[in-house]
Image (cartoon, rainbow, N blue to C red):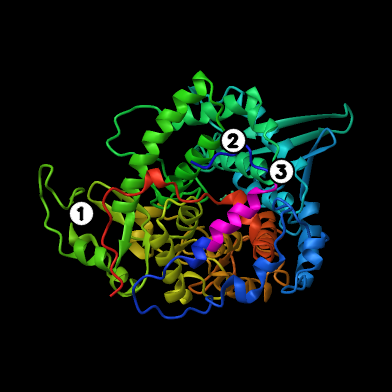
Amino acid sequence: MDDLRGVNSQSSISELDDLARLLDRPRLNIERKRSFDERSFSEMGIFDSVNSSGGRSGWETPASSTRNSFEPHPMVAEAWDALRRSLVYFRGQPVGTIAAYDHASEEVLNYDQVFVRDFVPSALAFLMNGEPEIVKNFLLKTIQIQGREKRIDRFKLGEGAMPASFKVLHDPIKKTDTVIADFGESAIGRVAPVDSGFWWIILLRAYTKSTGDHSLAETPECQKGMRLILSLCLSEGFDTFPTLLCADGCSMVDRRMGVYGYPIEIQALFFMALRSAMSMLKHDAEGKEFMEKIAKRLHALSFHMRSYFWLDFQQLNDIYRYKTEEYSHTAVNKFNVIPDSIPEWVFDFMPLRGGYFIGNVSPARMDFRWFALGNCVAILASLATPEQSAAIMDLIEERWEELVGEMPVKICHPAIESHEWRIVTGCDPKNTRWSYHNGGSWPVLLWLLTAACIKTGRPQIARRAIDLAESRLLKDGWPEYYDGKSGRFIGKQARKFQTWSIAGYLVAKMLLEDPSHLGMISLEEDKQTKPVIKRSYSWT
Ligand code: GLC
């Protein structure tokens, strides 16, 4: 298990060793096309420039100035200015960043709030720049909000639920600041954000890892906050799967999009949060009880995900040939998926080389759509085995037009249209085909792609994506999302100066410049969660 205790500036060195080991690991025994990224770190001289600053070097630090590979792009300074303009203060202290600072837009909706998930890239940018205070303030403010009583109509929500967003109200006359929060009771669809608690735990680890300051995670408030979140997702129910059952719209895709059930985004974040919590829980009686539960869940969850959510050419072929109506323990087609339900597009989409975790698996249902966030988080959390991680990167390369196109990164592929769109989204006019959550392109996902690229030793893929973003993002005013099959058009209702588009770009740049930052957002493979049986991953 990744244990944060005793982590100090030395940690960046050992992580680099880990990274270097990843890069060095024996190549799979196949004729792999030498990808455009395999000039790799050593040729780019990245490792030469990494020092033992504990992953906290900023643009002005000596580490940056001795670096030979990158000149700061002019967009970087613009992005920092825009990010700082989005800061939200509570009693004079910065506690978060507003979702969008778009003065041109008449409709503010809830974009003037601090969203937990949106703040993550902002937080990482500040951590990487050696400014951890705002992250600490945010973590403490949100954990305080968690302690409030939460109701939707007459129904009381679980104690551990974290807000989707909060807003600071300034009263200039009384000179007071108050916080109002949304736990889903104001959100479209009234769905509680399952991802918020997971991101909170992941961010607490990032803070601890980046600063070496364990005192925050060890406070009774943070320990309790973690345990409350864990109680919600580790409670026993009627489940037969270790995955977490969710309503539609409970994460980044916060409208009805047919992701109800066991969406990959939530499962990957769940896995990462469990592993992060494991490294931060105190070894006292309460902490130990949770650690035992976590260990069991991780074991089952990784097996389930690696076995049943994984799809590659071989696996697709197996499903295509599935028998149905099998009963008993010997069933191969455990969820009784009917081969006729495999959509046509996936046969063309699946390359010989590559694979991915599909969107959802439940009885008689496999959602074959690709979701970028879940797959990147699966790589970062080491939910994906090293072979699976490499295969996901292969897929991105092989299906670049579809998954990146002209603006990184497609949130999901493909879009749903016509009759299916009517049935699945409930005729959602914001989620028409190739728009917004339905196959739109989201610049924020650039940081996740970059982190995944670095972890898998393929930084050139990230560089190529960043180049695309740099050709338009600033000029277009940092849109929230792009529309169209290849992401060429600024989204129909996209906000401008969307903070996570700005921060996502900065994080991507800093990660690429100094890969030692990766440690705060990545977990190495845990030997205990290795799959018992391995799916045949065929490269032929
Ligand atoms: C939209 C997005 C959601 C994001 C929010 C604020 O609702 O779907 O993921 O958190 O905007 O940017």
In the displayed structure, 504 sits above or below 520; it is below
Q: Label 2: state its secondary structure.
A: loop
The quarter in which the C terminus is drawn is: bottom left
Q: Is residue 519 visible?
A: yes
Q: Label 2 crowding class (10 Å Cα cut-off): few <14, some 14-19, many 20+?
A: many
Residue 504, position in %: x, y? 65, 59
Distance (Cα) linking label 3 and label 1: 47 Å
Which residue sits furthest top? Answer: 285
Q: Main secondary structure of the magenta part?
A: helix
Disc 3 vs disc 1: Cβ atoms closer than 8 Å?
no
**Label drawn at residue 211:** 3
Q: Label 1 crowding class (10 Å Cα cut-off): few <14, some 14-19, many 20+?
A: many
Residue that carries the numbered disc 1 in the rendered image: 337
In magenta stretch: residue 10: yes
Part of the protein shown in magenta? 9-20
**Label drawn at residue 163:** 2
Residue type at tag 2: Pro
Residue 90, position in %: x, y? 79, 35
Mark 2 C-beta to ligand 1 under 8 Å: no
Q: Which residue is drawn at 43% across and 65% down?
A: 390
Residue type at tag 3: Thr
Q: Which one is nearer the viewer's eye here, 378 or 185? A: 378
